[in-house]
Image (tube, grey):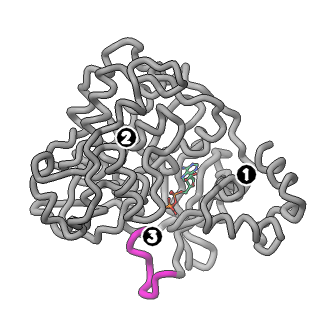
Amino acid sequence: MLLGCRGVDEFERLNKIDEGTYGVVYRARDKKTGEIVALKKVKMEKEREGFPLTSLREINILLSFHHPSIVDVKEVVVGSNLDSIYMVMEYMEHDLKGFMESMKYPFSQSEVKCLMLQLLKGVKYLHDNWVLHRDLKTSNLLLNNRGELKICDFGLARQYGSPLKPYTHLVVTLWYRAPELLLGAKQYSTAIDMWSLGCIMAELLSKEPLFNGKTEFDQLDKIFRMLGTPNETIWPGFSKLPGVKVNFVKHQYNLLRKKFPATSFTGSPVLSDSGFDLLNKLLTYDPEKRISADTALNHEWFREVPLPKSKDFMPTFPAQHAQDRRLRRILKSPDPLEEQHRKELQQGEIGLGLVCLRGPSTDLHALVST
Ligand SMILES: Nc1ncnc2c1ncn2[C@@H]1O[C@H](COP(=O)(O)OP(=O)(O)OP(=O)(O)O)[C@@H](O)[C@H]1O
């Protein structure tokens, strides 16, 4: 597969964009064509037995996929000592998480429709091709200044066949993780991605995560408080899931409509009846009854006024090219683990290659918000 690959020295590295679980991502220029691309260095150190499987899986999936809502992987290149591998991808100015952090107000309903349509088309393409993404979240959704949304990060994606095989269940990032995974279901399917889309739709409307649990238990608690505690009637098979405890607090009511009312005087995000119907169908407990990407794409919400905004009129921000997105997140983050990391950064204990990091915290914030 790697025979005949170009070398990474054919690219000029411009800056580090981010560092995720499976690789570092750089902005780079193709020396031959001048094209600006994203280079994802595939992490090797965790795998003793040669090339990381997660990366091979991601590369194979991405090289074979072509869709306007899936980030385009152009080629695979090798490091100078043939000991590292990079994926060359089209460069996208933002990820949705960082983009929303730069926005003063949440997206409007018509903007959310434009983004959700693109997202649903990408997810339908994946599901039609027997791939579960398993890690859909706002930081894995890239946005460019042409209003195009593209799904990235296929490190956790799996091709699924039928019959379903048990997969490990600790896969989707906590906030977007479907209840069946949180409750230890051994078999799961495309519905796990649809739950993540429900959480993302809510976050696009309100500019804050819907269920920001700190632990698996806290995540379930937050879901149950908002949507009511499930039972055998609304979710047959629920009581047999490995993680179900008899002493779950029974919350009787679904409070989602309170959070997304039809009219609002309090600044809550407004959502029409049909928009709320779609959100409810994405956040349905029983995975068998949860709406599919195909059905969701034909939902009446997308045909009702306000109509989906055209991509050409979506908001844009200048890309903050020279910033490491991960560093910016850590410096803004209230997460206690990352808080420790932030303190270390402020004390200059972790070198991330940025010279000005040793100043007082106000300088740091000035640095990251410029
Ligand atoms: N093609 C791209 N263009 C611009 N930025 C990108 C591109 N691909 C990834 N990024 C940035 O890099 C970040 C990490 O990328 P990605 O999610 O693919 O890595 P990962 O190691 O699999 O991360 P994770 O921890 O989310 O599993 C993204 O959130 C995004 O900000």
In the rendered image, which residue does mark 3 sit on? 2
Residue 360 drawn in magenta: no
Label annotation for residue 323: 1
Dot 3 or dot 2: first in sequence order is 3
Q: CA distance from mark 2 to mark 1?
A: 28 Å
Q: Main secondary structure of the magenta part?
A: loop
User: What x and y, as percent, mark residue 211?
Assistant: 43, 49
Identity, as a three-letter code, of the amino acid under mark 3: Leu
Dot 3 or dot 1: first in sequence order is 3
Please give the range of residues in magenta: 46-55
Residue furthest to the right in view is 359
Foreground residue among 230 and 216: 230
Identity, as a three-letter code, of the amino acid under mark 2: His
Indicate the quadrant containing the N terminus: top left, top right, bottom left or bottom right.
bottom left
Identity, as a three-letter code, of the amino acid under mark 1: Gln
Residue at screen point 88% across, 59% down: 360
